[in-house]
Amino acid sequence: SQTIHQWPATLVQPVGSPLSLECTVEGTSNPNLYWYRQAAGRGLQLLFYSVGIGQISSEVPQNLSASRPQDRQFILSSKKLLLSDSGFYLCAWSVLGEANSNQPQHFGDGTRLSIL
Amino acid sequence: QQQVKQSPQSLIVQKGGISIINCAYENTAFDYFPWYQQFPGKGPALLIAIRPDVSEKKEGRFTISFNKSAKQFSLHIMDSQPGDSATYFCAASVPRWGYQKVTFGIGTKLQVIP
């Protein structure tokens, strides 16, 4: 069965410090990978998605970047964190069904990031 | 532009009652409608999903009703239990250039009281 791991679970960082959040998926090959940010009362906002190694697309302009160095590894980074980067970050994976049909996205348990 | 409108934002239901959460969408290209359940400190977990060629899907106590002409869909939780207390998100998805573009509702915080 497929599993998704995110770490760390919680992180407290000072403003201006760098960031690296990691996500790995097991039990599937060539998944689509996603980074979301969840803010209270605002649902889930897609930040980045990747359809393959080294292929990253950004949905919204921001202070963050993403990388996919391996098929099942997705990393969210920042060189200098801002107060507004605080939030709950979720990684997700999915696969395309037959004839490009939609399949569900499956989420990790997230990282709670607090910027001081 | 909020493409998936979810209501209510919070809901209190007595144990054994029916919880109903409604969503409406605008984009007729959506072709997959999942519901997610999220407990505090956890990621959303897929609960049930429906495609627009079906008007209703039932899995245990959870039912999705789908009205394509009205562009609305809803989640019904029958015999609600305190363990169902969580935040529920509706979503709508459209395939786009090899990935799924998913738009989420704002979420409904459900509390089931004994």
Image (cartoon, coloured by chain):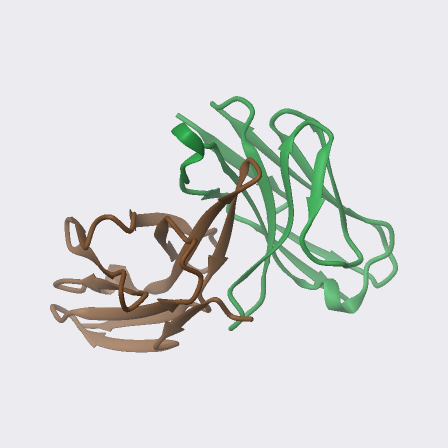
Chain colours: A green, B brown
Query: Which residue corresponds to the image point at 32% horizontal and 65% vertical from the top-left?
Result: B71
Decide if residue B46 is on the left or right side of residue B42: left
Q: Can residue A101 be seen in this view?
A: yes
* Of the pair B25 and A75, the residue shown nearer to us: B25
Residue A104 falls in image quadrant: top left
Query: Which residue corresponds to the image point at 84% horizontal and 63% vertical from the top-left?
Result: A15
* Quarter the N terminus of chain B occupies: bottom right
Residue A51 falls in image quadrant: top right
Decide if residue B82 is on the left or right side of residue A4: left
Query: Which residue corresponds to the image point at 80% horizontal and 57% vertical from the top-left?
Result: A63
* Of the pair B76 and A55, the residue shown nearer to us: A55
* Quarter the C terminus of chain B occupies: bottom left
Coordinates of residue A71 in the picture (x, y in percent): 63, 24
Decide if residue B48 is on the left or right side of residue B77: right
Coordinates of residue A91 in the picture (x, y in percent): 57, 44
Q: In this view, does A74 lie above or below B57?
A: above
